Image: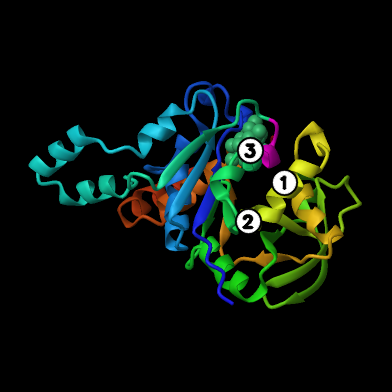
Amino acid sequence: MKRRVTKAIFPVAGLGTRFLPATKSVPKEIMTLVDRPLIQYAIDEARAAGIEDFIFVTSRGKSALEDYFDHSPELDNALKKAGKTELHKVLRSTNMDSGAIAYIRQHKALGLGHAVSCARKLVGDEPFAVILPDDVIAAEKPCLQQMIEAYQETGGAMVAAMEVAPEKTSAYGVLDVLKKDGRVLSVKGMVEKPAPGTSPSNYAVIGRYILTPRVMQNLENIEHGAGGELQLTDAIAYELTTGRDIFGYEFEGKRFDCGSKDGFLQATVSFALDRPELRGELASFLKGLDLSDTSAG
Ligand code: UTP
């Protein structure tokens, strides 16, 4: 049976404290890698995977995000008049059709699980994707598309997974893996931020999910977990207690944690080096840097 996934939730209501003071007035998702905001990478990935309905869970101070997807007639006309066709095309790619995008508020930052549950009425009775825009994944085939293709075979709930160094597992949701078949991992448990030395595997959950309406119901039934937040991981893991399947998908591609400063900087350099018009100068600048004193910090 083909299971179509046409709705995606983008939880963007976090406080973004790791980027203060910038995020005092600029939403984290509007920060740019080279010249495109994080949210544009997420939207492009969703579109490539066939997503038609885009649901943003936002909060106070995120109006720049709503404006970003609006039409901009002045810019539009100016670029057209000046014959700047390429730039005009770029600008048009940021537009969303009327009705394709919905914004819903999370009034208090009560965690990712809570943010997702705010969209329950908009999702209705369909499977849906969740994309965290601060996980940027560079891949030949966009990560969500890889997952949706795998999901056609597996059904169940699916999370993106990536192997991390053992000492890093305590920063992630981690999978307890029963077996691995190609890139698909059958999962028998999930733990949010396991204490050092207790992690069931090195497979960390990354910010792409395909979930069923049942996970939404679970969010209403479970207690607040690690850090007092309503954990999405717990709501997904709850599926196992009712005999339903969870899968990890070990995606092909390179993931950057753009919610952290070092991940964001690495992504900036990497994406800039991928741009032919920037590569030469940037590469020679990087080669010329004196990196002899990088031990500190
Ligand atoms: P993070 O854990 O990165 O938190 O959230 P954050 O608030 O964005 O950033 P820091 O840690 O304070 O720097 C992961 C994703 O979940 C969303 C965030 O917007 C981000 O996309 N989120 C988190 C919510 O939408 N609501 C929440 O209550 C928490």
* Residue at x-position 50% and y-position 23%: 61
Q: Secondary structure at mark 1?
A: helix
Task: Name which of mark 2 and mark 1 comes first in the sequence.
Answer: 2
* Spatial separation of the CA atoms under disc 3 and disc 1: 9 Å
Give ligand 1's quarter of the image: top right
Q: Secondary structure at mark 3?
A: helix
Is 114 part of what is drawn in magenta?
A: yes
For disc 3, the neighbor class at 10 Å (few under 14, some 14 to 19, many from 20) is: many
Looking at the rendered image, the disc whose residue lies closer to the viewer, 2 or 3, is 3
Considering only vertical position in the picture, is 80 above or below 179? Answer: above
* Spatial separation of the CA atoms under disc 2 and disc 3: 14 Å
Is 140 part of what is drawn in magenta?
A: no
Q: Is mark 3 within 8 Å of ligand 1?
A: yes
Q: Which residues are magenta?
A: 110-115
Residue labelled with disc 3: 115
Q: Is mark 1 within 8 Å of ligand 1?
A: no
* Residue at x-position 20% and y-position 35%: 73
Quarter of the rendering containing residue 250: bottom right
Residue labelled with disc 2: 209
